[in-house]
Amino acid sequence: MRIAIYGTGGAGGYFGARLALAGHDVTFIARGAHLEAIRASGLVLETPEGELTARPAKASDDPAALTDAEVVILGVKAWQVRAAGEALKPVLQPGAFVVPLQNGVEAADELTQVLGKGAVLGGLCVTFSWKSAPGRIRSIGGINAVRFAELDNRPSERVERLRQAFTAAGVKADVPADIHKALWEKFVIVTAFGGVGAVSRAPVGVMRTMPETRSLLEQCVAEAAAVARARGVALAQTAVADTMSSIDQAAPAATSSLQRDIADGKPSELDYWNGAVVRLGREAGIATPTHSFITDVLQPQERRARGDVTFPA
């Protein structure tokens, strides 16, 4: 397949490199030193099993380079989704489609408002990967998987082709029966894991074993699950226990992109993770005190990273 990776960070870089190594025609959209390194030396995956290099790698900072793409895997940050959709609108060929991999439950809706429902799938991923240096993506191992489907959950040939492409690349790919349920199942876990991690500055192996932070994780999970059900999402009655079980199985050293961005003083997806739980909960009439606390207490760091306020680190 002719595949574009729009946003070559941890998720986009990891899955794009895997697809390129499997022989697919992959174009990476990146910028700055990251782009130059990819052009010069390929995209390097640092894995527990050793390094792999997708080379030669096609890379550009211009969305116009994607006019022949059959599918665009969108790996930008959540607050960049709408702008990415606007940039893609004039270059997507008829029949091409976009698969957003953002952590959150609003990306597909934002894209359909720009590109139309026929050009967008629902999608999500699981990976503990990040850009470690220009041209390099580090993965700590564990599960690396993608899930995607048509927004109306109907079977389609394009979904099956993409599933086969990922599978052939050694990536676990699943087409859930209900993509909206799948998105919320992940949203429930990442907002707890990410929010508590950002506040505590601890990896998941510590958070889940200390009674205080484990309690915060459980409260976050329960609040987000209540919001999902109030919005008509068919989460299982065992969703809280199932989510805590998943947290217990995560690699002990794992941290979320939200936690890393907050710690590094970078703009984060706070408003699309914990902030979204609060916002969507308010719309549904569900109280979310733990997510509200996390969102409020992290706002000074977030606003400083975005240049809205200034104070010493």
Image (spheres, rainbow, N blue to C red):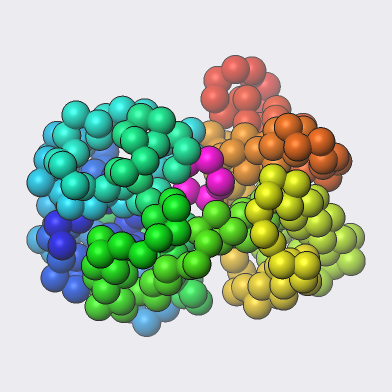
Q: Position of residue 160 (x, y in %)?
A: 29, 68
**Quadrant assignment, res 87:** top left
Which residue appears at 53% of the width and 50% of the height? Answer: 103
Pick whichever, 18 or 242, lies toward us. Answer: 242
Q: Position of residue 221 (x, y in %)?
A: 76, 57
Quadrant of the image occupied by residue 14: bottom left
Residue 166 sits above or below residue 304 on the image: below
The residue that appears at 87% across and 61% down in the rendered structure is: 215
Q: Which residues are drawn in magenta?
A: 102-107
Residue depicted at 44% across the width and 51% down the height: 151
Quarter of the image where the N terminus is located: bottom left
> Any magenta on residue 105?
yes
Nearest the eye: 140 or 170:
170
Image-based side of 162 in relation to 286, left or right: left
On screen, residue 200 above or below 91: below
Q: 164 and 40: which one is in front?
A: 164
Q: Is residue 253 above or below residue 64?
A: below
Instruction: Report the side of 213 relative to 149 (left or right).
Output: right
Residue 292 part of the magenta segment = no
Q: Is residue 97 left or right of residue 190?
A: left
